[in-house]
Image: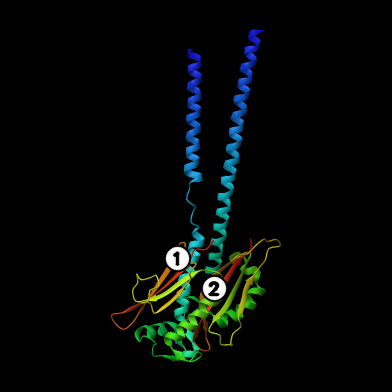
Amino acid sequence: MNKKSQMELMGLAIVVVLLSLVFLFVVRFVILRPPSEPIGKEFAESEMAANFLNAMMETNNPDCSDIKMSTLFQDCANNPPDGRIRCSNPDAYSCFYLRNKLGELFGSTFNSWNINYNFYASFDPNDIEGTSKDILTFDDDDCTGNRRMKQQPLPLNPPNTLYLSLFICEGD
Amino acid sequence: MRIRKKGQIQMMETIVVLFIFFIIVILGLVFYTRIAKSSLAEKLDQYEELSKIQVAQIASSLPELQCSQDNIVKSNCVDLLKVEAATTVMSNNAADYFDLFAFSRITIYYIYPRTGNWPDEWEIYNVQPDDWDSKLPSYFPISLFDPFTQNYYFGVMVVEVYK
C-alpha cells in the first residue's frame, strides 16, 4: 500500500470514529433519557392529597350534631368496633357512618374525576397497604404505578395515634 | 485523455462525499428538530400545569374569598358569604382580575354534606380567549366556611386554563 492510500484509510477511520461517538452521545442523552417527571403535575397531586385530608378533617357533620370528621375518626378508633358517637342518616355509630359518608365523598370527588386513589386509616404509620388492622380502607385496585402520599396523624387515647394516609395514583 | 479521466473520477468522488455529508447534516437537523419539538411540547405542558397551580393558589388566597376570623387568615378555606358576593363582583370586574388569572375559569363546587342551604357551584371567574382548543381541569379540595352556622364543609376549587 502506498502512503496516500494509508492516509485515506486513516481519514476514513477518523470519520467512522467521530460518527460513532456522535451516535453514542445521541443514544445516551436523547433516546435513553428517562422521561422527565412533570414537576407541576407532581405538585398538583401532592397538593390535592394534602388539601383533601385537611378539608375532610375540618368538615362538620350535621347528622352527628355538627361534629368534625376528625372527631368521628378518633371516636371510631378509640372505641372499636363501632364507636360511641351516634349519628342519624344513616342511623349508626361513628365507624359505620364514616364508612358510609367517606364512600360518598370519594365517590363524588376522585371517582367522578377518574383519579385512582387509596385511603387507609391505620394505627401504624408504616402499615400503608390496607391490612385487616386498618379501621378504614378505601382501596382502588387500579393504583399500580407511582403514588403520591400524604399522611396525617390524629392523637387518640394515649399512647395511640391514628394515621390517615391518602395516596393519589399517578395518572396518564 | 487518461489524465482527464482520472480528474473526472476525483471530481465525482468529491461530489459523492459532499452529497453524503449533506445528507448526514440534513438527517441530523431533522432528528434534532424532532427532539427539540417534543421537549418544547413537554415544557408547554409543564407551564400549563404550573399556571393552573398559580391560579388556584392566588384564588384561594384572595382576600375576597378566604376565611378569616379576628384578622387571622385560615389557609385552604373560603368563606361562603364572600364567595356569594365575589361571584357577582368578580364577574362584573373581570378586567381587574385578568392580570392574576388571565384566560381561565375558576369554579367552586359544594361537595359535602348536602344541607340544601347553599347552591352546588359558584363560577368565580371566567374569561375565554376568542380561540381555544382545550381546558383541562385541575382540582383543589378546600374547606367552605359557613359564617351562619360556624361550620366547615367540603368543597373543591376547579381551575381550568384555556389553551
**Along the viewing direction, whichever of B99 and A107 lies nearer the viewer:** A107
Give the x, y percent position of residue A122.
Answer: 37, 76
**Along the viewing direction, whichever of B12 and A129 lies nearer the viewer:** A129
Residue type at mark 1: give it: Arg
For the residues marked 1 and 2, what is the alpha-carbon distance in whole angstroms? 17 Å
Q: Seen in the image, is A166 located left or right of residue B63?
A: left
Residue located farthest toward the right when viewing the structure as drawn: B130
Q: Is residue B138 above or below residue A83?
A: above
Residue picked out by circle 1: A148
Give the x, y percent position of residue B151.
Answer: 49, 86
Q: Are marks 1 and 2 on the same chain?
A: yes
Residue located farthest toward the left when viewing the structure as drawn: A159
Give the x, y percent position of residue B48.
Answer: 57, 60
Q: Which mark is residue A19?
A: none
Disc 1 secondary structure class: strand
Residue type at mark 2: give it: Asn
**Mark 2, chain letter?**
A
